[in-house]
Amino acid sequence: MSKVTIFGAGYVGVPTGAHFARTHRVTIYDPDTEKIDTIRKVVNNESDELHIHEKDLIELLRENRQNICLTSDITQALKDPEFIFIAVGTPPNEKGRANLKYVCSAAEEIASNLKNECIILNKSTVPPGTAYLVQNIIKKGLKSNVKFAVGSCPEFLAEGTAVEDLRTPDRIVYGCDDPEALDKITRFFTFLQRRDSLCPMTTLSSELTKYAANAMLATKISFMNSLALLCDTIGANIREVQDGIGRDQRIGSKFLNASMGYGGSCFPKDTQAIAEYAVLNEVPLSIIESTIKINHDTTRYFYKKIVEDFNGDLTNKNFVLWGIGFKARTDDLRESKPVEIARNLMDNGAHVHIYDTVAGALTNFKRENPTYEGKYTLYNEQYEMFSNEIDGLIIGNEHEKFRNPDLEKLESMRHKNVYDGKNILNNFLIKNLTRLKFQYKSVGKDSVVNGLDRSKLVNFLLDKYMD
Ligand code: UGA
């Protein structure tokens, strides 16, 4: 059992701390006393309200409470940790570069208060080289001659599945250039995870791996979104193509869902950050620049499909939006594509009736969109808003509740339009919709409804492929 201190009680710090506490003694430190109090109340069964919406997190915190200490006191946090994990925010600036302000102030606090030999690992997503910067700051600020090493241990958990991702990760990536420290980190993780999931490497490689993983996943999605456009144009079905390529194990079936674009606090930020980092290093990553551009274009493409149905005039039109979070089961609206679509609709005169399975997502939408007050209505029930004044239903995220809508409850709509922003309705349901005179639009499988124009394709081939 090791003594661990986590810097930062946010989306990464709290689940990570709760997970480490299964086998280690963990102190979660955050200067924000309100956050620490909120967690303390939850751990002590005095409240069920956490500032982070994460499945099973409250249970995990309570299960491991005997190993968790919560504090806003830096002296207590740095009394005698063997490992420190920095898990503070790295918000992007206007150029898309990660802001290292919080990482650097964590390093300064560590320098001023460290008294014991320690390994400091950075969990925050940072540009490669940051561990060396942290090392320099600590070296400069240390009050005594304490031995320390700095490395990187990026986080790969996804919002909504953090606890499960931490329990059964595909791999644990960590890097440190000091071989003795690297061995100690390996021992730390062997208490927690399967040995074959451990992935030790150099500091820089570990830092780059984080950006590379998110950029690769985002690129998979943008690749499918580009193909989806081609599918809509020629009459193929992106879902079928997805299945056809995803079963090739070299490609893999995950993260191939075409959609109205990826969102969240990670993919948009990290693709931008790695693209910018590469340009600054004079090795532009044009593939990632394309990924970013395609993501913007796809959202516009999806929005255009809606607007076209009303000849560009959305005045007095009413839309239902199911799912406002950037994905299902989160209250996080950062870079949320459904939010972008809702704002575009409202900017152009429409009223949006919004439902999400997570109440906090609705509260956040209200708080973050004061200028749109009066142009939207929020609902805690999925079907309550349907009436003969509704002109379209937009599916904003991939929650199970949206996969199999009760069609009878949709029948009252004035204009029977269904816009599937996450391609989650299956062919059987789409055919039922068509039978009931609904119009269905998606990202790359409109052919299920529209069929395809074989003679057009034949003429195209005869014209262009017969030299
Ligand atoms: C992502 C990664 O999946 C995590 O591994 C990583 O640790 C995390 O970023 C991070 O850097 O902290 P997250 O942003 O929580 O996790 O959410 P994802 O489940 O990856 O979804 C991101 C976006 O892509 C969502 O808008 C989702 O709807 C969209 N998506 C996902 C698609 O459009 N198609 C897919 O096939 C998969």
Image (tube, grey):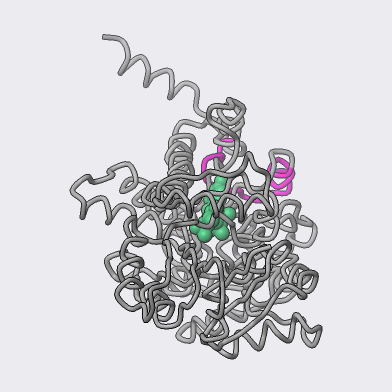
The stretch of residues the image draws in magenta is: 429-447
Looking at the image, is 253 positioned above or below residue 126? Answer: above
Q: Position of residue 434 (x, y in %)?
A: 68, 44
Instruction: Report if residue 233 is visible in the image.
Output: yes
Looking at the image, is 26 positioned above or below residue 447? Answer: below
Left/right of residue 170 with respect to residue 85 in the rendered view:
right
The residue sitting at 69% across, 38% down in the picture is 427
The residue sitting at 58% across, 51% down in the picture is 422
Question: Which of the image's four quarters has the N terminus?
Answer: bottom right
Q: Position of residue 121 (x, y in %)?
A: 47, 62
Looking at the image, is 180 positioned above or below residue 29? Answer: above
Instruction: Report if residue 421 is visible in the image.
Output: no
The residue closer to the viewer here, 98 or 30, is 30
Question: Which of the image's four quarters has the C terminus?
Answer: top left
Q: Position of residue 356 (x, y in %)?
A: 67, 69
Q: Is residue 442 covered in magenta?
A: yes
Dividing the image into four quarters, tell me where ligand 1 lies: bottom right
